[in-house]
Amino acid sequence: MLPMTGGMKGWTREQMAMRAAMDIPDGSYVNLGIGIPELVAKFVPEGREFIYHTENGLLGMGPEPAPGAEDSELINAGKKAVTALPGASFFHHCDSFTMIRGGHIDVCVLGAMQISQYGDLANWSTGAKGAIPAVGGAMDLVAGVKTIFVISQHTTKNGAAKLVEKCSYPLTGKQVVTRIFTNLAIIDVTPEGFRVRELAPGIGFEEVCAKTDAPLLPLEET
Amino acid sequence: MINKLISSIASAVKDIPDGATVMIGGFGEAGSPTALIHGLIDQGAKELTVINNNTGNGEVGLAALIASGRVKKMICSYPRSSHSKVFPELYRAGKIMLEIVPQGTLAERIRAGGAGIPAFYTATTVNTPLAEGKEIRRIEGRDYVLEYGLKADYALIKCERADRLGNLTYNKTARNFNPIMCTAANITIVQARKIVDVGGLDPENVITPNIFVDRVVEVANPVIESDLVAEGICYP
């Protein structure tokens, strides 16, 4: 486990992944998207067991192999070398998407380009001329998985808000995201809109508001 | 006697005509029938419609077929790759058509095509641009999109072991789209790493029953696409 505080400001990629892992219940079947979500597998809290699904046909996916032990026919959805844990199974694409579309996967952690205050997700195309659309399994995942978490930097590299009132990019799914883990905060999508659940160390509510293009409800006092 | 074994790659792919629709197995390089794809490049068929999850790596295999200008249209879920610029450049130049299909819908359309099911409803793509112009039906309070089954003239498949009847087993995540594509093509052509005697495959472990397979060619030491890409090799 990583130290979560210590005079720093905001969360690193690893800390965002670790916080997301902490919110996944024991015994969950979990699908991890490409990018920061892949890091979630490194931070399973002690005493919990998750089973990882990768859409290209493996349930029981393990960590990356030792250098030199990579197998070009044992890869994850990001086409990186992985391992198969004891108890794993291989299957073809229809079985894999039966797991996804049939509602058998409990939690999916995805990356995002934009998330709206209603939980709409855009993560497959900017819709710009000349952009190459690439949807992969994202639309199947948001349509079929019970709980959709997003891990993402709070803003783009250029500082534009990713949490917005309404997505300007083409949608992956409507009203699908339940919780967002950014470098600044953990934010729930509620029927009233975005609500801060936890602030990263050294980050104030005002700063998160300033970097969010939608109304933000403050932390609920408990 | 039934014998689906073919002695050479060239004869296995020789009758694929111009304008054919070809399903190609694989997810990235895993399960890609690279030897058969290279055979198709050598053979010269053009104006092809290709169904694959991706658009190939570097300038070998599917990416090389696309680079050769033989592919008129790609039907795929994820045409971006960190290792291939071939498809994006042709697409931006307007030289290749793209039908983008979510991965699960792609798999189910192929399954349906192989199973004689002309169409089905799915929740995937509801409220997105990919559902535009498609029939929406509300079933038990939820909206679903009508999607049609996919069939092909040919399927190019990679497997691990095969017998002369066409029973197939696969290796790890190289299985992916291969078994379902076997069912959805008029002619299914397989490259197998090893041919075994009939009876040499445990019936409990056969993944593709031989009824779905037409031709099998042994490719004992298939190239690994990422090795070719790392070496900077461009096919042909």
Image (cartoon, coloured by chain):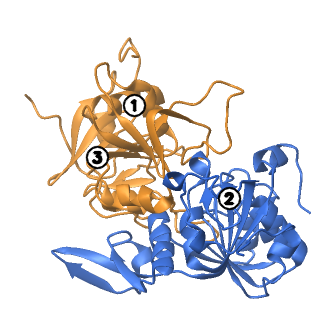
Chain colours: A orange, B blue
Residue that badge 1 annotates = A16
Task: Give me the C-alpha separation between circle 3 and circle 1.
Answer: 20 Å
Quadrant of the rendered structure where residue A129 is? bottom right
Disc 2 secondary structure class: strand
At x 43% / y 75%, what residue is drawn?
A: B129
Residue that badge 2 annotates = B162
Task: Give me the C-alpha separation between circle 1 and circle 2.
Answer: 46 Å
Whole-percent x, y for residue B184 in the image: 56, 77
Tag 2, which chain? B
Tell me if residue B192 can be seen: yes
Quadrant of the rendered structure where residue A87 is? top left
Task: Give me the C-alpha separation between circle 3 and circle 2.
Answer: 36 Å
Where A110 sits versus A143, above or below? Answer: above
Task: Find residue B161 and name its label.
Answer: none
Residue that badge 3 annotates = A106
At x 58% / y 70%, what residue is drawn?
A: B181
Tell me if residue B68 can be seen: no
Q: Tell which of A126 and B9 is nearer to you.
A: B9
> Is the residue at mark 1 from the same chain as the one at mark 2?
no
Disc 1 secondary structure class: helix
Tag 1, which chain? A
For badge 3, the amino acid type reads Asp
Whole-percent x, y for residue B194 in the image: 74, 52
Q: Tell which of B88 and B68 is nearer to you.
A: B68
Q: Residues within 10 Å of mark 2 (few under 14, many from 20)?
A: many
For badge 2, the amino acid type reads Ala
At x 15% / y 55%, what residue is drawn?
A: A191
Q: Quadrant of the C terminus of chain B?
A: bottom right
Q: Residues within 10 Å of mark 3 (few under 14, many from 20)?
A: some
Q: Residues within 10 Å of mark 1 (few under 14, many from 20)?
A: many
For badge 1, the amino acid type reads Met
Q: Is residue B150 left or right of residue B43?
A: left
